[in-house]
Image (cartoon, helix red, strand yellow):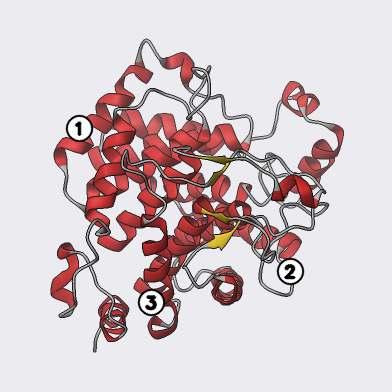
Amino acid sequence: MRSPFTRFFLCLALVASSLTAAASAAAPVEPWPAGAAPDEVGHRLAERFVQSPHGNVNRPPPKEIPYAEVCAWYGALRYAHATSNAALREKLIARFEPFFGPEANLIPPPVHVDRSVFGALPLELYRQTHDTRYRELGLRSADAQWAQPTARQREALPPALRATSDEALQQGLSWQTRFWIDDMYMITILQTQAYRATGDMRYLDRAANEAVAYLGRLQQPNGLFFHAPDVPFFWGRGDGWFAAGMSELLRSLPADHPQRGRILAGYRKMMASLLRYQAEDGMWRQLIDHPEAWPESSCTAMFTFAFVEGVKHGWLDAATYGPAARKGWLALVRHIDANGAVTDVCEGTNKKNDLQYYLHRDRVTGDLHGQAPVLWCAAAWLE
């Protein structure tokens, strides 16, 4: 009986699709178009990343490592592992080493979801190197996310978020809960990585319970997610964070976990909706359900990643979602310039109950919000 992975590529072959050389033994398929192979694309983006200074494009040097850099670093590590690229991995390790010395001040304190997610990075380094320094550093962030906040931390929250945080604590959720859709990658990847590094189910339970709470609060009847309860827009990258976060969680969640059925149902409902909204050219838009919105690369990469993972692991039908995954990937390749920079990436975006605010966000080239999920995609194709 063929695995979902093999069935996936057989289906792609039937629609004139292809795979990389690394996985070509799974089925006789035609090659990717020139310049589109995931190993080639991933190499270009990973090398661009390791040669870049800390921080994001068009920004001054950061006072601490921003979450977008963490996400790109994680993607580059995952790509290096998928391709057994020891030289790249050593560069990524060397980039981190100063955090144990002169650059320790760049480590974000784990007092907010966007800052706590840093811990997912050393946990990935631990998984690849077994150096316990990385595990200790990563678990510090994972555990702080579920600790009782200090009085000072609580008072630092805006009043509305303080009330949400108090409610979350009463439900056994993280005090950093705020019910913004972005959180469902930031919280999920950190706690899932802590589980992967330790085998301790309490980390996975945290991620699963948080995901179920967000599903109940933000997923709409059409399967998509509002940016926040008071912001009724289906912002592309916001929904992308949830799609990617659920994919990461489902990869590790045991089949008999009590929350798996709810999470898988929410994931499939979302994927079905995304399939309907994918444009003919393979892209998704800055606001998913607004045809006048511009095609946006970071959400396209995140949704493609979720499709690839879903088909490979048997959560999605290969004949239906395989061609869509390929179409999304080929669309992304057309949005990467000669320097390995992803184009048409939405700038950093706060929540706001204003349609024009989302429609008129700037498009950025080389922003790590876009570089990161393309690296995740490249790794997912190759693993």
Q: Quadrant of residue 347?
A: top right
Q: Which mark identifies residue 322?
A: 3
Crowd class of label 2 (few under 14; some 14 to 19; many from 20; radius 10 Å):
some
SS type, badge 3: helix
Of labels 3 and 1, the one closer to you? 3
Residue 103: where, in percent of width, then height?
40, 14
Q: For the residues marked 3 and 2, what is the alpha-carbon distance in whole angstroms?
A: 25 Å
Q: Which residue is mark 1?
A: 90
The amino acid beneath tag 3 is Gly
Q: Is residue 143 left or right of residue 316?
A: right
Q: Earlier in the sequence, mark 3 or mark 2?
A: 2
For residue 323, which numbered disc appears in the image? none
Residue 220 image label: 2
Secondary structure under the numbered disc 1 in the rendered image: helix
Out of 382 and 204, give the one closest to the viewer: 382
Q: Nearer the viewer, residue 296 or 188?
A: 296
In the image, taking residue 275 as reference, residue 132 lies left or right, namely left
Q: Quadrant of residue 92?
A: top left
Q: Can residue 380 be seen by looking at this rendering?
A: yes
Which percent across, then down, holds residue 320? Answer: 44, 83
- Residue type highlighted by circle 2: Gln
